[in-house]
Amino acid sequence: MIVPMSCRETVSCLLDHVERRLGSTRARRLESHLKECPRCREFLASYRATPRIVRRATAVAPDRGVRRRLHAAIRRALRPSGSDTPVGPRRDR
Amino acid sequence: MTMAARDDDRDLVAQAVNGDHGAFATLVRRHEARTFRLIHRLAGNRADAEEILQDTFLRVYRKLHTYDRRARFTTWLYRVAVNTARMHRRAAGVRRAESLESYLPGFTRAGRHRRIDVDYSAAARVEARVSASELSRVLLQALTRLPERYRAAFVLRDLHELPSREAAAILSIDERALRQRVHRARLMLRGYLGAVAGSERA
């Protein structure tokens, strides 16, 4: 006889569930709750989709200006001019 | 990243430590796009991301001699990036936007979903309801509203798709804690997506 999980417990196990890391007893208790609970099935669908949606929406590539200014800043730091103290990786360690 | 590329990173670091500027430039070019994406997601906007990106690579250069070859170069690089982003945030005295914690799911005392009048799956269809540019704007903003320790964990593991072990190593925490933070962040963002989709409200 399997005691189904509550919604709260189900939600707390979702990461382990979607990555199949739950032990067999807990996995069965969770499955048994999902069968009976449309709310948790809906919740699972959006929980699963969340990383992909956020990943797609927030992937911003550096434009050419960003890259150019980055390399210029590095060159300035690597080849200090005049009286500036040279900056470089120390090797005294 | 392949084994060969990883070895290559280590060789480039060794050459850069010996004063080979070209080797360092190659190392930067190899990692700048991914590092920028990471930093942009932590910082939330392009201008801050650019500044943090420069600081990160300059710090990396100055500290190259401390890099431990046993670790992946990217583990070390991303740790510097995360810490630099954190320092910028503190230095800028970024006012706390309202935290996303209010989007965590609520339960009754019996442990059932408190709200039964909403479609919890609507969050999964938010892309059909909101334009891509609007979604990009609100989600970059939303990431900055995650409590800091959740944000870095979620960004590294769920957005950059690093293995839990590596994300945990970057943040110097154990894998269990990492997974717990990722889970909490996902719950908050899921609820937030539901609100953006117009179906759930905090």
Image (tube, grey):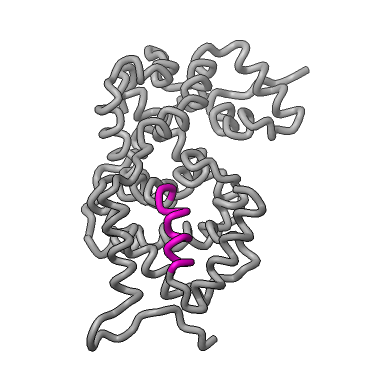
Q: Does B89 sit left or right of A4 as displayed?
A: left
The foreground one among A57 and B179 is A57
Task: Tell me what residue is drawn at x 62 percent, y 50 percent.
Answer: B165
B29 magenta-colored: yes
> Which quarter shows the C terminus of chain B?
top left
B106 magenta-colored: no
Please, is residue A78 above or below residue A19 in the view?
below
Q: Position of residue B127 (x, y in %)?
A: 35, 20
Q: Main secondary structure of the magenta part?
A: helix
Q: Which residues are magenta?
A: B22-34
Q: Position of residue B185 (x, y in %)?
A: 44, 39
Please, is residue A46 above or below residue B90 in the view?
above
The foreground one among A46 and B130 is B130
Task: Tell me what residue is drawn at x 44 percent, y 48 percent.
Answer: B34
Q: Position of residue B82 (x, y in %)?
A: 42, 57
Task: Tell me what residue is drawn at x 31 percent, y 39 percent.
Answer: B140
Task: Tell me what residue is drawn at x 44 percent, y 16 percent.
Answer: B121
Q: Does B189 sit left or right of B112 as displayed?
A: left
Q: Picture quarter containing residue B189?
A: top left
The foreground one among B175 and A56 is A56
Q: Picture quarter containing residue A26?
A: top right
Please, is residue B202 above or below residue B151 in the view?
above
Q: How many marks?
A: 0
The foreground one among B186 and B7 is B7
Q: Position of residue B157 (x, y in %)?
A: 52, 43
